[in-house]
Amino acid sequence: MPRPRQPRLTRQLIVETATALIDAEGLPAFSTRRLAAELGVRGPSLYNHFATKDEILDAVADTVTAAVDTSGFASRDWVAALRDWAWSYRQALTAHPNIVPYLAQGPGRRPAALAMADAVYGGLVRAGWPPARATHIGAALRYFVAGSALGSFARGFVEDPELYAAHYPHLRQAHRLAEHQQSVDEGAFALGLDALLHGLAAEYARTVATVESARPNG
């Protein structure tokens, strides 16, 4: 009986397999040797497609970023665009939390990451934000989203009522947080995002909109 043929090694197959490995085993456990074994090939075969392990990680990170929707910056007001972007960004990162520490290092030369940064920055500048402030806003939202994707607040509390009852009376229900992980984490993200956007809208009205209205017509 003939042996089943090994799927042809491609960049896409390498990236998909690397993503699945990182999702399952974490970033520290990832190696080109482990990836090659999972693909059923010898290590040097990978280097026909990627020169280094970091190039593979860049490709994984950029694939995750490519799922983020930035279309709102071309069609919606800046507040709605930021909200849509933040939720889409969070969804992409929470689907692959183990790659977040690598992705959070910055866009580097990754095309999808640079395109996302360009869309956000360009949309804010078109809305009237000064370039420096647009940079600050994009960075602040990125910190907030990446931080929310790194871990779960609810899972940080052990499910042991005895631990809290004796010494932490205000945390008597903390052991139940893990049961409501999704609602707790999404609720916290929604609250924080609303607070950020309301604060930015107030600053925009106080500074940018005031400057625009003071300019002479024509």
Image (tube, rainbow, N blue to C red):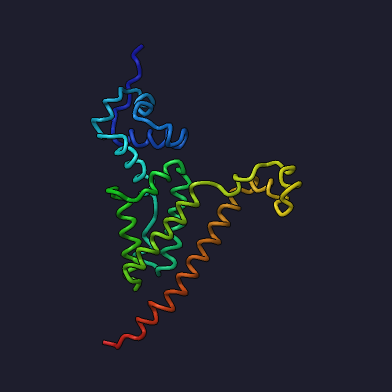
Callout count: 0
Residue at the extreme front of the image, as rendered: 167
- Above/below status of 9 relative to 187: above
Q: Nearer the viewer, residue 108 or 74?
A: 108
Q: Quarter holding the C terminus? A: bottom left
Residue at (31% x, 85% y) in the render: 215
| Residue 58 percent location from the top left of the image | 32, 42
Q: Quarter holding the N terminus? A: top left
Q: Nearer the viewer, residue 93 or 80?
A: 93
Q: Nearer the viewer, residue 131 or 4?
A: 131
| Residue 128 percent location from the top left of the image | 34, 73
The answer to whether residue 41 is left or right of residue 21 is left
- Above/below status of 208 relative to 168: below
| Residue 160 percent location from the top left of the image | 70, 41
Residue at (63% x, 48% y) in the render: 180
The answer to whether residue 60 is left or right of residue 191 is left
Residue at (35% x, 26% y) in the render: 33
Residue at the extreme left of the image, as rendered: 48
| Residue 38 percent location from the top left of the image | 39, 26
Q: Nearer the viewer, residue 80 or 144?
A: 144
Residue at (47% x, 44% y) in the render: 95
